[in-house]
Image: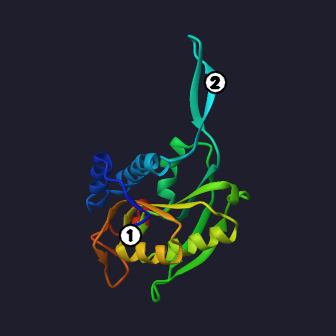
């Protein structure tokens, strides 16, 4: 699929299998989600621009490369996206963190916004939206809508599992947004859950029902 990148590294796939397992408790689930997010961040940031700098090692002068260009921003979709934030911040501690609060109406399955707090300079940042599940695509589409309304022009989505329906919905509305995922599952069920998926990511992260 165009603009969709499946990260199939063995460590990512192994940890994703543990995340899917219904026997995995909340503590281990949180730790695994954070670890997978950190591993996936290597691929999401693979094409960050570099510039040559000159430094001095204990032995002598050295030409080296450091990240240049746009600053980064991490934007979790509340609440499940929070479980992925620390994984990225361990690699990119200087990134600013925004928050978008959305919930899914149980009748219409459509997202409803209840909170949005973003860095003032979103237009100058490469933004990574975090949400463990790309299901119907409604939340992802609304999140990108909100970011673009605030002036963002460089946006990626990072999720653990995506459904074909969600990928299609996001690319239909925002074909410029790259999607990074660890798996593309079969389909959605009648309740809008990904099959086989992993259940409700927010409930499993925070031990709620």
Residue extending furthest right? 120
Residue 108 x/y as whole percent: 47, 88
- Marks 2 and 1: in contact by CB < 8 Å? no
Q: Can you give x and y, in whole percent of width and height, for residue 183 in the image?
A: 32, 61
Circle nearer the N terminus (1, 2):
2
Dot 2: within a 10 Å radius of its alpha carbon, few (fewer than 14), some, or many (20 or more) residues? few
Q: Secondary structure at mark 1?
A: loop
**Residue 30 visible to the viewer:** yes
- How crowded pointer 1 is (Cα within 10 Å; few <14, some 14-19, many 20+) is rated as some
Of badges 1 and 2, nearer the viewer stands 2
Image: 89 above or below 197: above
Where, quadrant-wise, is the C terminus in this rendering?
Answer: bottom left
Identify the mark at residue 200; answer none if there is no mark: 1
26 vs 87, left or right, is: left
Quadrant housing residue 134 = bottom left
The quadrant of the picture occupied by the N terminus is: bottom left
Residue in the picture at 51% in, 42% down: 90
Is residue 208 something that shows in the picture? no
Question: Relative to residue 162, is residue 111 depicted above or below?
Answer: below
Query: Could you say which is closer to the camera, residue 205 or residue 162?
Result: 162
Q: Residue at x 58, y 70 (%)?
A: 144
Q: Nearer the viewer, residue 184 or 32?
A: 184
Left/right placement of residue 82 relative to residue 150 reads left
Q: CA distance from mark 1 to mark 2?
A: 48 Å
Q: Residue at x 39, y 50 (%)?
A: 36
Quickly name the residue at label 2. 54
Q: Which mark is residue 118?
A: none
Tell which of 133 and 24 is nearer to you: 133
Residue 50 x, y percent position in the rendering = 58, 39
Q: Position of residue 87 (x, y in %)?
A: 48, 48
């Amino acid at each position: 699929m165009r603009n969709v990148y499946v990260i199939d590294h063995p460590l990512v796939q192994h940890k994703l299998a543990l995340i899917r397992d219904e026997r995995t408790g909340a503590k281990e689930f949180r730790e695994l989600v954070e670890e997978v997010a950190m591993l996936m961040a290597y691929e999401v940031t693979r094409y960050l621009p570099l510039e040559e700098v000159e430094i001095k090692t204990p032995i002598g002068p050295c030409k080296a490369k450091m990240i240049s260009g746009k600053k980064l921003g991490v934007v979790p979709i509340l609440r499940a996206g929070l479980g992925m934030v620390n994984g990225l911040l361990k690699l990119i501690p200087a990134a600013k963190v925004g928050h978008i609060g959305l919930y899914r109406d149980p009748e219409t399955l459509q997202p409803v916004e209840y909170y949005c707090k973003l860095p003032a300079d979103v237009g100058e940042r490469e933004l990574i939206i975090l949400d463990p599940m790309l299901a119907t695509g409604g939340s992802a589409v609304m999140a990108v809508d909100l970011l673009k309304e605030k002036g963002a022009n460089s946006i990626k989505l990072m999720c653990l599992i995506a459904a074909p329906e969600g990928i299609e919905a996001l690319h239909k509305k925002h074909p410029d947004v790259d999607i990074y995922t660890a798996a593309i599952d079969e389909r959605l069920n009648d309740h809008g859950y990904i099959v086989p998926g992993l259940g409700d990511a927010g409930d499993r992260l925070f031990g709620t029902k």
